[in-house]
Amino acid sequence: MGDSVASVTDVDFALVGHQESWRAAADVIAHLRGPEHTPLPDDEIKDILPWIPPRTVCHVEVRSIAGARARGLYIDSFIPPDRLEAVHVRENIARVRGAAACAIKAGAKIVSLGGFSSILIEGNFDQLPEKHDTVFTTGNSLTVGFIVQGIRKMCALEGRNLRRSTLLIVGATGDVGSGCARCLAPIVRRVLLSARNVERLRKLAAELEAHGTQVEIATDLQQFSAEADIVICAASLGSPSLLLGRVAPHAIVCDAGYPKNLSPGAEMPGAKVFFGGLGQITGGLSFAPDFHGILNRHPFPDVVHGCLLEGMALALEDRFEPFSQGRGFITQERVEEIEAIAARHGIYLAPLYNADGPVENGLDCQAEMIGRMSARDKDQVELTAADFCGAS
Amino acid sequence: MEPVVSLNSLATECSSLSPTAPIWQDVLAQAMTGELIAAMNYASLSEICDDPEEIADALEHAQIERGHAARFAAEGRRIGVDVPNNVEAKHWKRLREAFMRCIAEHDFIGCLIVQEIMLESFAVASYARVGKVAPGSLGKTFAAIAAEEEEHVDHAMAILRAERALDAQRFDDKVYRLHLDVMTTLAKMLAKECKDGHCEVCHGNCVKPSLFDISLSAAELRGASLQQYLKTLDMLGLPGEVTLTWVTQLPV
């Protein structure tokens, strides 16, 4: 942990990202300034950051438990955290395009587009620079995989039966939301889909209903006829502003947004909230300069968003292909494929946590859990806490 | 110190004073002083060149920069203000001294880095921003001069890229040494507030707080200048993660 990375000549992968809050951005700038310079005041950071062109921030090395290693770059698009709303989409696409150009110039073989960066290849693929040998992935398949794994794990920890659950997906027509719907619909009692675009909602509902799922759609969360007891928040929101309103007491709520979806003021007494879509690297992760805990701000070591991990896993596998592209193409089969690739290299579901800290009472069980899960019949739904928590 | 460009020699076309004229007067004074420093720098550069073509180029550039200064003076007269200049003002003097240290070492490449990469990044970006908000002829002049300055940079880039290709590490180390000297001074000039006292160019109080009245801000001019600087260094091939660290460590 924290080893320095040798000078990188071959770039296997590039991770394109942005900071989700001004606090996170301030920490990055403070780290770049170094301890000998006083941290910049918040107002100066807000003035300076929007002018920084997309560029490499640090070198990254990831190691597999199978012995492989891959070298890459973290490239920040420097999208200001308060300009993530749709009104800034043109400016943000230009920034992501600039970041993509940096990755291409560096000779990256595969690029994972984190957070809002994935807009570039979800619907704006023609905006990428032309003539290059670099492939791009949104990383959304592995994000979906870790969200679904997190839901299953939380259900097991809480003794819930997925088959008797009503699942609500907020942001259901997005790439991640629809992927979660396809993976979970066959194993829950009922699905509630919420998004802004009613036509897309109808299309997704028809697809799920064709496979026998009971589906309800609404653009307003208050319109649903039933309360959800499992919720996935996967909307593209500029800031944590989502108020779920009516959910079942003790509902399991997965906030998979980047930035987070749920408003800090959301009152859901009894709800079990966790942050979803996160994986943990167990073979080793290094940054140069050392940005541990700054670029990946999680209470557990070497935890990274699934979207970025997808590119790293594919690089470790020596599979440089655009695994996740476009919107609405994520299937359960593809999710299982990328989960298997990640697991081969020691990339597993991260320990579950939320804004208050770990939600597993200190049980450090994820690696054992995934190992067992991979070996089990994927169709088996009713896992128990012992399946997840090393009860041997 | 006497203005280097005589205002009396310029055609007069005064209009009535607008409430923002004193602000434009200070903006023009900074721009004009910068152009005169550039003219002096190119004249000094011609003295260390060996190649007659390089000497001619440097002298031509000096003449062009003097022409820019004259055009800024003329724009001042159009809006009814005299445009002073002060190449001895503390920040500008420090920038000139940094350039002259390169001259003393016969460091042609160092001179190009200071003038074309650092000072011109500042000029191109800030003139372009001013050009967008300044009214009429004033705006057109700033925009046109920004475009002309950008052409200068293109000329120097080819020379500097060739130099970096010979020994990238040595070249980057030189840029960093000059960055610490020159960009630290420029960053202080571009800070949102002048913390070291009066800049000795503005005719009264510091113009920065008044820039909002002409749809500008000191933060915007600084941001645009540093962005242009980073992009120029990118074009030279310096690693983006390295130049990012340099820029974030500048004073604010």
Image (spheres, rainbow, N blue to C red):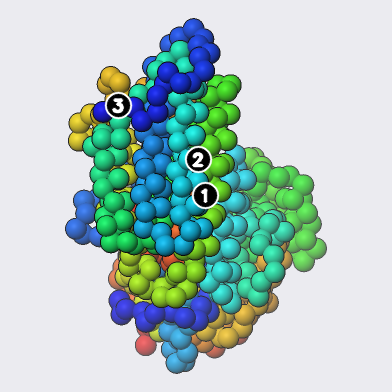
First-in-chain label (1 vs 2)? 2
Query: Which of label 1 and label 2 is nearer to you?
Result: 2
First-in-chain label (3 vs 1)? 3
Q: Is residue B217 left or right of residue B134?
A: left
Q: Which of the chains bears the disc numbered 3? A: B
The mark found on residue A304 in the picture is none
Residue bearing mark 2: B64
Residue bearing mark 1: B152
Q: Is residue A63 left or right of residue B145?
A: left
Label 1 – label 2 distance at C-alpha: 10 Å
Quadrant in the rendering for residue A356: bottom left
Residue bearing mark 3: B2
- Marks 1 and 2 in Cβ contact (< 8 Å): yes
Quadrant in the rendering for residue A284: bottom left
Residue at disc 2, secondary structure: helix
Q: Nearer the viewer, residue A45 or B178?
A: B178
Q: Which of the chains bears the disc numbered 1? A: B
Three-letter amino acid code of the residue under disc 3: Glu
Q: Is residue A89 above or below residue B233?
A: above
Asked whether the viewer can see residue B142, the reply is yes
Say which residue appears at 25% left-offset and 44% top-offset: B94
Asked whether the viewer can see residue A292, the reply is no
Image spot of residue A290 (x, y percent): 32, 70
Image spot of residue B95 (x, y percent): 30, 45
Say which residue appears at 57% left-offset and 80% top-offset: A314
